[in-house]
Image (cartoon, rainbow, N blue to C red):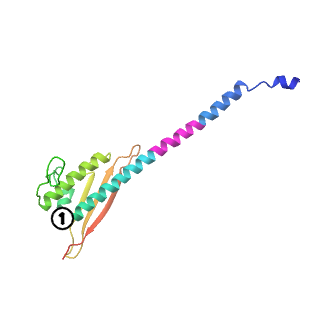
Amino acid sequence: MRALTRARGLTLIECMVAVVVLAIGLLGMAGLILRGLRAGHDALLRTQAVNLVTDMAERIRANPAAAGAYDCASYTGVPSTHNCAATDAAAGANCTASELAQDDLARWQDAARAALPLAQARCAANVEYTAASAIDAPALYRVGVSWVERGEPELATYRSDLLLVPTP
């Protein structure tokens, strides 16, 4: 009977140890959740970058006559829209291939600024054009975007090369 009267329950120290172990476990879980959220956000940014680069490659492929008009370096400022594409507010205007390329580039850069935290460079959403070296050689378009990922010192960049062979 004497042994039963001594064992009355948990001591204060045992309760404190249990609370500390539980707190450490909860902090570890919170860290994992935050890492998962950050990885999901980074994946979303990369997916948006891939979609943006693919969009511009398709625009270039649809307007092969524009050639160097898609080159971002050929503009002293930023490209401007020429309202070539129809919107909810207005019908599209008839544009030359060069005007359509400038309109495509301006709209694409606006979409990139809306979708990604772009780097502060003038052409963080960029297209570089290299003319064909021979009449039957392909022209090279390098389409890329650079953005800032939270907590990373280096810019994240996604680029894709598009080779367009001239049609005979």
Residue 27 locus on image (x, y percent): 56, 36
Quarter of the image containing the C terminus?
bottom left
Quarter where residue 3 is shown: top right
Horizontal and vertical percent position of residue 134: 20, 75
What residue did someone put label 1 on?
67
Magenta segment main secondary structure: helix
Taking the view exactly as shown, the residue that stands out farthest to the right is: 1
- Check disc 1 and report its element: helix, strand or loop: helix
For residue 102, side relative to residue 4 (left or right): left
Q: Please check the rendered image and state whether residue 76 is part of the magenta-colored stretch, yes or no.
A: no
Compared to residue 72, the image places residue 38 above or below, namely above
Q: Nearer the viewer, residue 103 or 120?
A: 103
- Magenta part of the chain: 25-37
Q: Is residue 12 left or right of residue 81?
A: right
Quarter where residue 132 is shown: bottom left
Side of 165 relative to 149 (left or right): left
Which residue is pictured at 23% across the width and 62% down the height?
Answer: 60
Residue at x 24%, y 48% (from the top left corner): 110
